[in-house]
Image (cartoon, grey):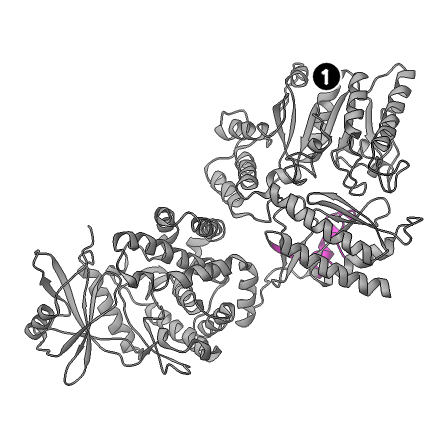
Amino acid sequence: MNSVTPTFSIETLTTLLQHHYQLDGELTALASYCDQNLLLVTAQQRYVVKVANSAEKKIELMMQNDAMTHLSSNELPVPQVVKNQDDQQITDIVDTQQNTFYMRVLTYLPGDFYAQANQQNMSSTLWQNLGHFMAKVANTLSDFKHQGAYRYFDWDLAHGYAICQDKKQHLAQDQKPLVEYFLSMYQAHVTPNLAKLPCSVIHNDANDHNLLVDQTNTPSKITGLIDFGDMVYSQTINELAITAAYAMMEQADPLTTLVNTVAGFHEHYTINDDEFDTLPYLIALRLCTSVCNAANAIKEQPNNDYLLVSVKPAWQLLSLLKEVNFYAITCRLKVACGVNPDQGKTKAEIKKYREKHLGKTLSLSFKEPLKIVRGQGAYLYDEQGNRYLDMVNNVCHVGHCHPKVVAAGQAQMAKLNTNTRFLHDNLVNYAEKLLATMPEPLSVCMFVNSGSEANELAFRLAKNYTGSTELLTVEGAYHGNTNACINASPYKFDGPGGEGAKDYVHKVMLPDPYRGKYQGNTADSATAYAEDVQRAINELAEHGKKPGMFICESLQGVAGQIIMPEGYLQAVYAKVRDAGGVCIADEVQVGFGRVGSHMWAFETQEVVPDIVTLGKPIGNGHPMAAVITTQEIADAFVTGMEYFNTFGGNPVSCAIGAAVLDVITEEQLMENAKQTGDYLQHALRKLQQAFDVIGDVRGIGLFIGVELVENRNTKAPATDLTASLVEFMKTQQIILSTEGPFYNILKIKPPIVFNKQDADTFINALTLGLQTLVSD
């Protein structure tokens, strides 16, 4: 039913109180959300008169009354219900429009509101006591049962997600993204665990206008709790989430307020792991519920100033929470409560098991490896909640655990995951979306599970189309870990344990403008390197052979973060095609907008490949990959042998891939890669002027290499210094790695949500590292 707010006059209520309660005194209106509340002052004492809105059910008011009695019997300071002359706790009254309302009279609790207290003098003592008090409320209500508590309610956090989804339409356009961010986070991190959270009847509204304190100047103790109108059966941890959300608002250091409140709560109510993990998300959901409900109510009651009481500070707190990691908060809360944040195996135990049972070739980063358990944006978090700026992860492209990507995978996983022998919208919708980013004539999509699979399939496509298995590959290149990919990767077959190039594999010069034979980013160097490809083609021709394929990363990664001379691929592609081969662009590491100026790195060389292979960033960490080619090459693959991939193109992978593309567009991440990449390269070049060990800074977008040398003239690689610098950066909580044949190149390939503030953090730490290590 529609809610009608009561509007009885003071005179009418005075008469009703005299008649039903034999109470006579002065009535003063109090602020209220949708009820009519008044203060009654008699000659003997004070009371609170409450007239519920018409939607309030009597059974729910009875539940509130019984709950207050239950709490009071356990020595908690809450109001008590005054019975009328008929010995009833609730009185039916009727207004002039014949609407029936329920009136109650409650005892008045003396004291000042938490909201009136001097915020500058609030302390850990007060917040811990707040936690103590609300934990006692939660414990006391844990055995309270009443059928009136089992209701659907707009302020029940159990329904907060749905409420916000419904009411966010009333928010201003610039406000919606912040709420949608937290809703996505809630869906990803709380929804799957909701059923595991303990439930009970809760007060559900311990805000600063419902809590009383001992004094306003230097408050140290909670002396009472009022207004039980929001009581509901819900997750017990919601009691703490709501309490904390209001306590944190308008505080100079809201996280300290949270830590003290939670620590106090935990002393009397043992918070379990699931509750710890969900608490920050529930706090954010309460704030989102507040602003969404307020936006809806303000449209209905534009003159009700009470509706705006908590809105502004709620928005401020949401903005702050957007900038922190909830896992790190959870770890901090656990430590404050004397709980070990990491309940898993120790690093030593994991390392020992890996060495014995997972193969000795499985490597680890750093001398003392990190145990990484969470990720968000451009940051990774260890088991104690310490955050590390991730400078090298080109897999979680749009940021670690992006909530929209996570939500897309969760939603589809809950519906269906199967192979491509059934029709499904996700496959064709994603293919259409992905192909729309490609130039003509690249119009056929084939899905696989990894970059290695993509390159292996590309080799098969090329062989079927050209009839030749002869493969041209660039020195130092890496294209994957299958047999065919290792055979195409000089980084592997010329490296430790390698067996050299197979007869059908032909190396061409690495087009390195800094350290290669032909230096400088010039037309002459591009031509000279391209001529080495012609050399390989000529040698094949002397043996009556032709190249089947030329594979080249659009930007050379493992070989040393190399930016090839402009025009190199144009010249090479022409030569390969003239000789009857096809050109494969390996975009497994560098695609999806990382270069900033274009979606695909091959576009920076102004070429259109015959085959493009995609991987790593495509699923933001989910194992998927793709091969994009022309209709002619795809048709040549139709030989009668079916190509089938059990997981390639499954509905879950396609949902995730589509979400990644959406995020890149919606959050303008390609533009961010350009702007932040330019900003970072400019800062690195300034640093180069101060440190001679920086021989070269090169890059495009957020694909950057910093080459360290012992001498700028000889370019002797500073391998040991580079290794030491990577370890030093770890002490500054920055994850960095090396690249190139001498491991003297700092590779910079962070998630493309990496921003200018992150860049400053990196530059400051790198400066300190160089000052420390070079001076030594």
Question: Does residue 616 show up magenta in the picture?
Answer: no
Residue ranking furthest to the bottom: 44
Q: Residue at x 48, y 60 (%)?
A: 280
* Span colored in magenta: 348-374
Q: Residue at x 63, y 19 (%)?
A: 642
Q: Is residue 500 left or right of residue 406?
A: right
Crowdedness near tag 1: few (<14), some (14–19) or many (≥20) residues, C-alpha within 10 Å: many
Q: Amino acid at mark 1?
A: Tyr
**Residue placed most toward the observer, 443 or 157:** 443
Residue ranking furthest to the right: 714
Question: Does residue 350 show up magenta in the picture?
Answer: yes
Residue 592 % position (x, y):
63, 37
The correct choice, above or below, for 203 with respect to 735 in the image is below
Q: Is residue 337 visible?
A: yes
Q: Which residue is mark 1?
A: 465
Q: Is residue 388 left or right of residue 92?
A: right
Residue 63 % position (x, y):
23, 65
Q: Is residue 471 left or right of residue 230?
A: right
